[in-house]
Image (cartoon, helix red, strand yellow):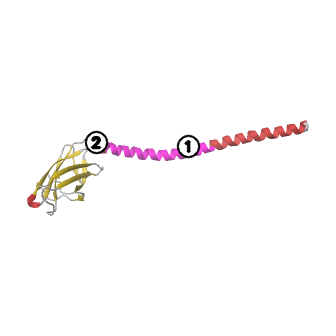
Amino acid sequence: MLSTSTKRRVRRNLAVSTVIANLLMITLTLSLAAILVAWAGTSFGSFSSNSQLFFAQRGQALQEQFVIENVYFISSNHTLRIFVRNVGAEQISLVAIYVNDTSLPPTGSGPGLCTSLPWTIGVGQVCQLNVSWPSSWSSGSVFNLIVTTARGNRATFTARGP
């Protein structure tokens, strides 16, 4: 059997180690929480600023609307005459024209023609694009036209050739 002084010493040692263990666990938990908060703050701060920029640009892109109104085929010089109208609330900048997945530059010159890309079209304005097409395309073939803008929007039009 243990004496009274030995029991006190054992009880005292147990009490001290339990308290210290609890304090160490609390300190460790709080320090890990502080590290997590610091890491999350920098990560989400960077994410937040990038997302604000993304949503601001997407807001402008959503206000950018345009249509391909009509396409005319001029057989004498193998030209497609494309009319693009800006119907949105922002001016647009045309950067590419694709005919059947082939990028083609605008050709020709004259009043009302968009002669080189990029071309800016104001709100409510119409741009006439002339594009040369190869004579190897057969009569009655289908033309898939895509006009793209600098903000990534695009308008499509499908027409049957002469």
Return the disc, 2 or 1, that comes first in the chain's sequence. Answer: 1
Q: How many marks?
A: 2
Secondary structure mainly formed by the magenta segment = helix
Is 53 magenta? The answer is yes
Q: For the residue carrying disc 2, how many other residues have a C-alpha within 10 Å: few (<14), some (14-19), or many (20+)?
A: some
Residue 161, given in percent of the width and then of the height, sits at: 14, 55
User: Of the numbered discs in the image, which one, if any, rests on residue 63?
Assistant: 2
Type of amino acid under label 1: Val
What residue is at 21 percent from the left and 53 percent from the top? 145
Q: Which residue position holds label 1?
A: 37
User: Of the numbered discs in the image, which one, if any, rests on residue 2?
Assistant: none
Q: Secondary structure at mark 2?
A: helix
Residue 83, given in percent of the width and then of the height, sits at: 16, 49
Range shown magenta? 31-60
Q: Quadrant of the C terminus?
A: bottom left
Is 14 magenta? The answer is no
Q: Can the viewer see residue 128?
A: no
What residue is at 81 percent from the left and 41 percent from the top? 13
Q: For the residue carrying disc 1, how many other residues have a C-alpha within 10 Å: few (<14), some (14-19), or many (20+)?
A: few
Q: Quadrant of the N terminus?
A: top right
Residue 155's place in the image compared with 79, above or below, is: above
Type of amino acid under label 2: Gln
Q: Is residue 149 left or right of residue 26?
A: left
Q: Secondary structure at mark 1?
A: helix
Q: Is residue 49 left or right of residue 37?
A: left
Residue 126, given in percent of the width and then of the height, sits at: 17, 47
Residue 40, given in percent of the width and then of the height, sits at: 52, 45
